[in-house]
Amino acid sequence: MSKTANPLKGIVNIPRFGLFVITAGITAAGSLGLPETSIFSLLPANILNAIDSSGSVIASEEMHVLLTIIPGFMLAPFISFFGMAAIFGITLGHLVIATTSKVGAVDLLSPLFTFLGLFFIRQYKSPGNFIGPLIFVLVTSLWLSYVGFTVTGLDMLPIMLFTLLSQAGIVAIGYVFYLIAKQVKIFN
Amino acid sequence: MPDNEKKVEFEHHVDTSELHSYMPALVGLGAGAFVAAGVIFMLKGFSLQLGAGLVGLFVLLIFIFLGGEIPRWPKITKESEQMVKAGGTPGEFHEIGDVGFPTALFILSEIAFFGGAFVAYFYLRSAYAVWPPEGIHHLDVAIPSIQTALLIVSSVMIEWSTAAVKKGNQTAVKLGFLGAVILGLGFAVIQMGYEWPHLLSSGELTPQDGLFGASFFVLTGIHGVHVIAGVIANTVVTIKAFRNQFDEKNHGFLEAAGTYWHFVHIVWLFLFAFLWQDGLSYFQAAVA
């Protein structure tokens, strides 16, 4: 039997398995192991008040949970380097985090939107292109906004703005690291 | 002589009939008897005669296996060495495909094993309306966080080594796997040398503390055994690396050991979520 007869060829890609596991590990550990930090504790009070003048969204415990930053999303721009293995890895890492979500079972669907967003980053992976990360932020923010709105029943606009800021902030930090990594050619 | 021709020439000298052994089926039967004993005891209560009979059958089959296999090991080792000299890769069975196939099959069997363990855990857990049950302390996440960091860094080092061996960078192969061995040992020492003794001696959590305590020690225990197995495999790779037995073409065992280590890492993420962070507890009330 020749090598081409391997029935798992293309399904289980051993050389990429490590990358898949490392990205899953970093994504999951970033949230499971580090203290929970939401965008509310990072933004200055005047911006918080400007977005949510009634203070109802800021006071909501569910929104605190939903807007907890996932440090692993800093890896999202690196999809351009790592490809599909990292897409699956970050998605699995997010799934592990979602199992511990205090929002409820609905959060188990969030990794699907993460996968979709990451896929766009891979589609627009030409050098310096930030359309992919931008679509990732939009897709994941829209989903989080929908969940936040459904769970809390509060105003949609401040929820959307907070989720956008939260997702954009973490991806922007990752994008800076991505640009640095590209500059020093660390992954070449 | 080109590598392909060398390999073809080697294949003609291998007695392929030895690859078709009845031993795996025998060991499977023995393991089945052992599992059957456990299941019967759980369902019907402990029976000394039945237990001794099934465990005796298991031990007998293992001895038959060892008696049949051990005499073949020197020959298999010699053939592997010949294969390396001829440009092939031990473990890269020419009859089945490349090293990815047997490794993937092994990993799939491990997925089935841990999958079964997790299913059993959630099945037993479903009897409780609240999880963890009342009276159980919430475990500190600091220790598993450190352990996770050790696993991530060790996986990165293995990945670095795997990439390096394909470029012929021997130093990176040696350092990468040596680092992974040290970090893996660190993981095992933290778990079995610090966390477990601390939990047991303080009485914070013991195997007698209901389903949570029993599940915690069983699941982290079987994972810990896998970590130790991974450390042993990585140690063997490290020793072989220091003897310069891997190069751009011959690194099947290195890649297989690395893949196994990555798998051990990924199982840990689920253990962390399910045991320390009460993963999927939002389904608890619904299924109880």
Image (tube, coloured by chain):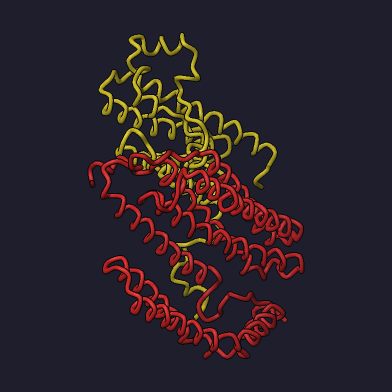
Tell which of B126 and B173 is nearer to you: B126
Residue B269 position, x and y percent, is 48, 48
x, y percent for residue A56: 32, 15
**Residue at left offset 67%, top offset 54%:** B182
Residue at position x 59%, y 48% in the image: B194
Is residue B37 visible in the rendered image? The answer is yes
Q: Position of residue A34 (x, y in %)?
A: 52, 34
Q: Residue at x 41, y 27 (%)?
A: A67
B14 over A22 or under it: above or below: below
Q: Is residue B172 above or below residue A135?
A: below
Q: Residue at x 43, y 33 (%)?
A: A135
Give the colour of chain B.
red
Report which quarter residue B49 is drawn in.
bottom left
Vertical placement of residue B18 versus A180, above or below: below
Q: Position of residue B124 (x, y in %)?
A: 30, 54
Image quarter in which the N terminus of chain B is found:
bottom right
Image quadrant where residue B280 sits = top left
Closer to the camera in the image, B77 or A179: B77
The image quarter in which residue B256 lies: bottom right
Q: Left or right: A2 with respect to A58?
A: right
Q: Nearer the viewer, residue B79 or B194?
A: B194
Chain in yellow colour = A
Name above or below for residue B12 compared with residue A104: below
Q: Is residue A111 visible?
A: no
Q: How many marks?
A: 0
